[in-house]
């Protein structure tokens, strides 16, 4: 895991640094640069159970809102029970609204690659089924290009012992999950799944990405 994290971090850091150099060349210093941008962007990510994904991204500085839901299926307004029956084609995913002036797509993808196993098809840990597949549902061409680039580079680097199976698809539809799925970890932290599955993952994430966490 440490080796994977090191390779991913190096890739993100190098490319982000290059992007920042180009950005500085074109920016004119002003007082407005000190104020967080009001323009927001969205990206939708599937990395297993959306309770886990939501708990992680809610802690990231620059993330404004995380919505758990069902993505890219063929049934309108599906219920959790329908999705669990594996007949709707939906993926459990989180739609992340963020301020690109505070956190970049590259940084969100860096977290994505590290907080789940992108080499297991339709499964994360004991959660198994097509609804748990690893996927990036991009909202624009830049997100598509960045996701495809990092997937290719990570495969070439040998960061994982198996080939990455993460799907990279355009967002076709997204339906917010039932209210009881929203803010699940924050409201159900002592529930067994939260305590034994989400909490250890969240604690590990907070140690690795402590510089990207919101102030508490």
Image (cartoon, helix red, strand yellow):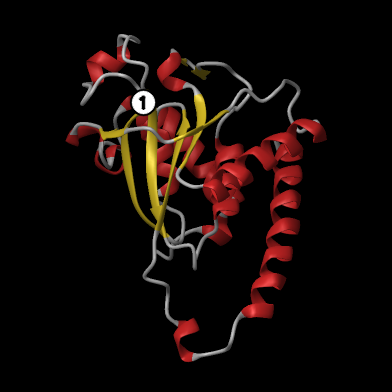
Which is nearer the eye, 73 or 198? 73
Residue 169 against residue 56 in the figure, above or below: above
Please give left or right for residue 118 compared with residue 32 in the image. Answer: right
In the image, is 50 to the left or to the right of 161? left
Quarter location, residue 7: top right
Q: Position of residue 78 (x, y in %)?
A: 23, 22
Image quadrant containing the N terminus: top right
Camera-side residue of 1 and 146 = 146
Q: Which residue corresponds to the image point at 51% horizontal and 60% vertical from the top-left?
A: 103
Residue beneath label 1, please?
193
Residue drawn at point x = 59 percent, y = 18 percent? 120
From the viewer's perspective, tell me whether residue 9 is left or right of residue 60.
right
Q: Residues within 10 Å of mark 1 (few under 14, many from 20)?
A: some
Query: Which residue of the protein is positioned furthest toward the front in this rendering?
Result: 141
* Residue found at the far right of this picture: 157
Residue 164 found in image quarter: top right
Q: Position of residue 53 (x, y in %)?
A: 43, 37
x 51%, y 30%: residue: 135
Q: Is residue 75 above or below residue 8?
A: above
10 left or right of 213?
A: right
- Whole-percent x and y of residue 137? 47, 36
Residue 19 in percent (x, y) is at 68, 64
Q: How many marks?
A: 1
Classify 208 as above or below 190: below
Label 1 element class: helix
Residue at 72%, 20% (x, y): give it.
Answer: 162
Residue situated furthest left in the rendering: 179
Quarter in which the C terminus is drawn: bottom left
């Amino acid at each position: 895991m440490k080796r994977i994290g090191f390779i991913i971090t190096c890739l993100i850091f190098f490319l982000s640094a290059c992007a920042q150099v180009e950005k500085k060349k074109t920016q004119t210093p002003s007082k407005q640069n000190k104020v967080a941008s009001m323009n927001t962007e969205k990206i939708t990510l599937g990395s297993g159970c959306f309770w886990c994904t939501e708990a992680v991204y809610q802690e990231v500085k620059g993330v404004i809102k995380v919505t758990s839901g069902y993505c890219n299926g063929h049934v309108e307004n599906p219920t959790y029970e329908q999705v669990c029956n594996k007949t709707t084609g939906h993926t459990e995913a989180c739609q992340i609204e963020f301020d690109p002036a505070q956190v970049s797509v590259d940084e969100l993808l860096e977290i994505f690659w590290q907080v789940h196993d992108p080499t297991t098809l339709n499964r994360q840990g004991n959660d198994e089924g097509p609804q748990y597949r690893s996927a990036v549902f991009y909202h624009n061409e830049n997100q598509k290009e960045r996701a495809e680039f990092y997937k290719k580079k990570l495969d070439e680097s040998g960061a994982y012992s198996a080939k990455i199976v993460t799907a990279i698809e355009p967002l076709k539809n997204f339906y917010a999950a039932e209210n009881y799925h929203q803010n699940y970890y924050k409201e159900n932290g002592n529930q067994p799944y939260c305590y034994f599955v989400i909490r250890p993952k969240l604690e590990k994430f907070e140690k690795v990405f402590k510089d990207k966490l919101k102030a508490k």
